[in-house]
Amino acid sequence: MEQDDTNLQFDGNRNLRHLLSLKGLDASLLTELLDEAEGYLTPPGSLPVRSDSLAGRTIGNLFFEPSTRTRASFDLAGRRLGADVLNLDVNTSSRKKGESILDTLYTLEAMQVDIMVVRDASDGVPAYIARNVENHVSVLNAGESDISHPTQGLLDLLTIRQHSADFRNMAVAIVGDIQHSRVAMSASEALQIMGVGELRLISPPALAPDANRFPGARIIDNIAEGLKDADVVMALRIQRERIGNLDGVPGIDEYFANYGISHENMKVAKPDAIVMHPGPMNRGIEIEGTLADGPRSVITRQVTNGVAVRMAVLNRIGQTMNAR
Ligand code: CP
């Protein structure tokens, strides 16, 4: 994201207008969003929180890449806040017939869509849309190339905070295809805004990130070193759709043996360390199935938190709209 796009996220009164990246946000805003998200959580089996704070507003889900969790949770979050939600199906949308992004955008604006939730495989698309929408329209990034996935970063931060709010004395290990992961990028940004003690990025050399993209993180290729005394371990999927050349990328068995998170290699982490995964998950490749289903796993909690965090973000955007 360009530096100018950081400012693009706020209106003239420093209210959050678009959420394109966590870059440029501060710890107090992240804390407010997480605190609000906590208020949307209810015990399993009870009815979800509902409000009419977005009644009359229309949310357009524009997902030009596949999604289960993010799209469904934005849909539920919007409906639980009283909005109308329009889900555009990429396979049947007119972008398949050559329509430009801007023409899709103008079409939705003409239908009085107020909030565009955008996922796209190309760099810069959410910011491009944000620069071209009418003044009353907001844009939320729901996953951009390998660049940014800000609501995923917030839901991961909330899940970690539920384990321990002592970010400064925490070691977080993110394991897998860091080079192609927008999840790693946004989680790192969120954790560093909160002053995380140690951020370790563990991957095979062929999937290691450019260190300049993750200032302050330790880049490690040995999993035992990376997991030692970690408080939080996050496994990532290999993003095959973003890897042009698979040379040097280990095959499945070699990958699981050296970089898969397992009961065995978790023994060096802190005894109460949690295991996270953003999904979609490939059992037996980046994570052992029984570990993903076991007591250390907070993977389904991440999904629950995703709805709550998206409600908090949508509500904040709605407040900005109402303040105009
Ligand atoms: N974590 C995540 O973005 O999942 P989806 O691709 O299913 O939305």
Image (cartoon, grey):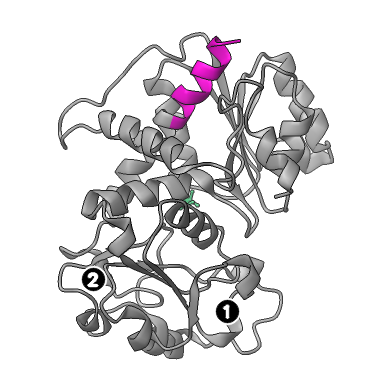
Pick the front one: 43 or 38: 38
Q: Against 206, is 68 above or below?
A: above
Residue 231: in magenta span = no
Q: Residues within 10 Å of mark 1 (few under 14, many from 20)?
A: many
Q: Which quadrant of the view contains residue 172? A: bottom left
Question: Residue 220: horizontal and vertical position, in percent?
Answer: 47, 83
- Left/right of residue 20 with respect to residue 100 in the rendered view: left
Pick the front one: 32 or 316: 32
Q: Label 1 near label 2: C-beta < 8 Å?
A: no
Measuring 29% from the left and 75% from the top, which residue is drawn there? 288
Residue 320: in magenta span = yes
Measuring 30% from the left and 54% from the top, which residue is drawn there? 160
- Quick check: can you spot residue 304? yes
What kind of residue is marked 2?
Leu
Read off the magenta span. Answer: 313-324
Q: What residue does disc 1 label?
A: 207
Q: Against 56, is 282 above or below?
A: below
Mark 1 CB near ligand 1 (8 Å cut): no
Question: Residue 207: horizontal and vertical position, in percent?
Answer: 57, 79
Q: Which quadrant of the view contains residue 95? A: top right
Measuring 76% from the left and 30% from the top, which residue is drawn there? 104
Q: Against 245, is 171 above or below?
A: above
Q: Nearer the viewer, mark 2 or mark 1?
A: 1
Q: Against 52, is 187 above or below?
A: below
- As helix, strand or loop, the secondary structure at mark 2 comes to helix
- Quick check: can you spot residue 92? no
What kind of residue is marked 1?
Leu
**Spatial separation of the CA atoms under disc 2 and disc 1:** 23 Å
Q: What residue does disc 2 label?
A: 291
Viewport quadrant of the C terminus: top right
Magenta stretch: dominant SS? Answer: helix
